[in-house]
Image (tube, helix red, strand yellow):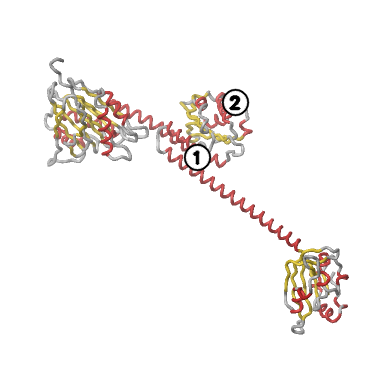
Amino acid sequence: MVEDLRSGGDHERRLSAAMPGLWQHVAEQLGTAVAVLDPAGRIVAVNPAAERLLGRAAAVVHGQDLHDLCHRDPGGAVVPRERCPLLRALAEGRPARGDDDRFLRGDGRLVPMSWSATPLTDDDVSGVSLGMVVLIVEIAAERRARRERAERAEQSERVEQAERAAHTSALESLAERLTLVAEITDVLGQTLEVDEALARLSRLLVPRLADWAAVDLRVGSRQVHRVAVTGPEGRDAGQEDWRGHLPPAGEAAHSPLVQVLSGGGPVLQVRPDLDAPPDSPLAAVHSAFLGATGAASVITVPLGSRGHVTGALTLVRTEAARPFDTGDLDVVSDIGRRVGLVIDNARRFGRQRAVAEAMQRNLLPPLPEHGRFQLAARYQPAPAGSQVGGDWYDAFPLRDGTLALVIGDVVGHDLTAAAGMAQLHGILRSLTWDHPGPTGAVVDRLDDAMHAITTVRMATLVLARVEGPDTGPWTLHWTSAGHPPPLLLTSDGNAQYLESGQGLILGTHLGAGGHRPSATHALPPGSTLLLYTDGLIEVRGSDLDSGLARLRRHALALAHDPLDTLCDRLSARMAPGSTDDIALLALRLPVPVTGAEA
């Protein structure tokens, strides 16, 4: 309770008049200690908070000098009055504060205090001091309150940091998942070979998304084949045991794998779900696999869509602290749809490719037996992922008994190119059969007739004739319509590209004023002539000159091998990376018969 000021003389009466009831009520309710001093520094009034802080009742402190009563230095001694900042401010009528003083409580305890003083002046008499209002705060309490405020602020900051970290982690996880899906889409788009696609898929999924991955494909209407199992590095030894044909699912089975293979949606399993007993032979095998991997959570998704399920993809995590969540389920489901599409396309392409290869091989004629000449040929379709093209070879005797050789390539890589190749093959045989003139004239006639009789727009070829008696000497007559030059290997270890006789490709329509050149070259006994298509020399990322040099180098190394061996090994030695078909036709001339041999 604030003391009544009317009993303290003139200053007290004037201060009392200046303190209306509202001010008195506020001071009494205020939690901060307030003391009112007269101009001499004597205590005029204190509020209840000041009574508690100073440990003295209002009646006891009333009229006493605040400095002498309470103000002490850190050692407990009275601060000299001339050094007291509170008294100096009171005398000068200005505000002041102290941040590290000591006040002596009524119980004799010395407590650290901070204070803030504001002068009181008489509004009626300008400049006349009525005293001072002093607010006193125990430093320990203030520090405690400040510490509590700091702790609350720190806790709030930790919560905000945790929320920001969680948000950032979620964004990073989403970005990582999207990046993984993009990478999988990219690598799957680079092949139409099922085994290669699944191998690339497994290398991306383990260990980036899962600890184990298994792929099951439907074979026919009922059978299921586990075609791939991939685990952590260093744990490959037992993976073969889980591959192969799986047992039948059984009737009304409810295991996730069976349901997915039967057209159900993706399934996320955690540890309690994995402990359910299997309800079919297939589920039993799959459950044993999950147990062997130490599965803590499992995702099983269909490969393809619900309307057309190609198989199932199973991913396993073995850490209980890092289980799969619904976000992972969405990502893996998307991956499953993409993989199913790739498998469907690969299977469809494989069927088409098999038909095209069979068609093309059946169109390639058997090689004739022609005197002592040796002939060999090879056709090699492009690697998986490319389509069958229009490469072809031919060798046949002409009406006058000479041997004709043909190597050609119809522009395009599809069944249309293969059909065009068959058309050109038949027409060229007809035009060449009874035409003893230059080979260039035959190729010109083929160019004139091509657009009228066939569907071929453009093609390259080499047409050659080997002239000479059975015992030699022999001469090669040839014309090239934009085709790589023939390669001649001689028995003395030389290799030469026959670059003469080059003309424009078929489809350019030279007309009546133009013609393709013909060339001739002697063929030494025991030499080997190679006609080939550009699949043997063109490799992605390499120039044509490098391809020709590579073919020449490999052919020289094989020049003395049997002709069939040379053809087999030549394509095997070529650098990988070709995406084109390869056709190869080889002719080896006999060695002259000596008198003793005769």
Q: Amino acid at mark 2?
A: Asp
Q: CA distance from mark 2 to mark 1?
A: 28 Å
Give percent across and percent down for residue 381: 32, 30
- Above or below residue 259? Residue 327 is below
What is the quadrant of the N terminus in the image?
Answer: bottom right
- Decide: few, some or many residues near mark 1? Use Cα within 10 Å; few <14, some 14-19, many ≥20: some
Q: Amino acid at mark 1?
A: Asp
Tell me the residue at 68%/58% (across/down): 150
Between 230 and 258, the one nearer to me in the picture: 230
Which residue is identified by label 2? 279
Which residue is identified by label 1? 334
- Above or below residue 484? Residue 372 is above
Give percent across and percent down for residue 197: 43, 34
Give percent across and percent down for residue 12: 84, 78
What is the quadrant of the C terminus in the image?
Answer: top left
Kindly give the residue lying farthest to the bottom in the view shown: 125
The disc, 2 or 1, on the residue closer to the chain's N-terminal end is 2
On the question of residue 252 being in view, the answer is no
Q: Is residue 444 left or right of residue 564?
A: left
